Amino acid sequence: MKTKKQLEKHAKNIKLLILDVDGVLTDGGIILDNNGNEFKVFNVRDGHGIKMLIGAGVKVAIISGRQSKVVERRAEELGITEVYQKCHDKVVAYESIKKKFLLRDNEIAYIGDDVVDLPLFKRVGLSFAVADSSDEVKSYATAVTRNRGGRCAAREVTDFILKAKGLWDRIIREYLEA
């Protein structure tokens, strides 16, 4: 694991945050009803952190192994335009996003929770495992959040990036002056 200072140094360069969904933006639970509807619970504080990050000029994308209309709706609400679902090989989506925005690996951060996220952990400049990830996944992450998936782990990362980039104080001032 890197020290906080080392993490902050890397976070200053982040131009894109990529998120997994199930287990990161949610607690990993999926509710299915008898009519085939799918329900997920998202944390509003995670969402607000994502909106602040986007508002500060950092791009945000989603790469998920599952397909869900709920994810499309949530992404639209948050202003996330890059949404890749049903990705069995997340590297393909990752490379597409990287090429589209002309980014280098060290300018990208990723939050994941399971072994399917490990290929991206190896590529990005900063990889975060949520607190309730398996020990195996945590061992490959650059850092581990204090919070669990769906319980402000994403907010923890968005705030960390904003602070490392020196943008946090300005954001807080804007809220205080509103």
Image (cartoon, rainbow, N blue to C red):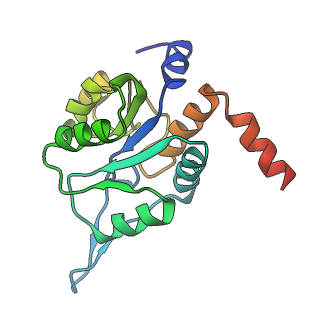
Percent x, y of residue 12: 55, 24
Judged from this view, the residue extending furthest toward the left is 88
Percent x, y of residue 89: 14, 43
Which quarter of the figure is the C terminus placed in? bottom right
Task: Give residue 57's quadrant in the image.
Answer: top right
In the shown orientation, is residue 34 left or right of residue 21? Answer: left
Q: Residue at x 50, y 60 (%)?
A: 78
Q: Residue at x 28, y 36 (%)?
A: 99
Which quarter of the figure is the N terminus placed in? top left
Q: Residue at x 24, y 27 (%)?
A: 136
In the shown orientation, is residue 144 left or right of residue 94? Answer: right
In the picture shown, does residue 24 fall above or below 94?
below
Could you say which is closer to the camera, residue 48 or residue 80? Answer: 80
Percent x, y of residue 24: 38, 47
In the shown orientation, is residue 17 left or right of residue 140? Answer: right
In the picture shown, does residue 33 fall above or below 173?
below
Task: Give residue 72's quadrant in the image.
Answer: bottom left
Q: Residue at x 32, y 39 (%)?
A: 112
Q: Is residue 23 something that shows in the picture?
A: no
Q: Is residue 144 something that shows in the picture?
A: yes
Looking at the rendered structure, the number of numbered marks drawn on it comes to: 0
Could you say which is closer to the camera, residue 105 or residue 3? Answer: 105
In the shown orientation, is residue 38 left or right of residue 149? Answer: left
Judged from this view, the residue extending furthest toward the right is 177
Percent x, y of residue 169: 75, 35
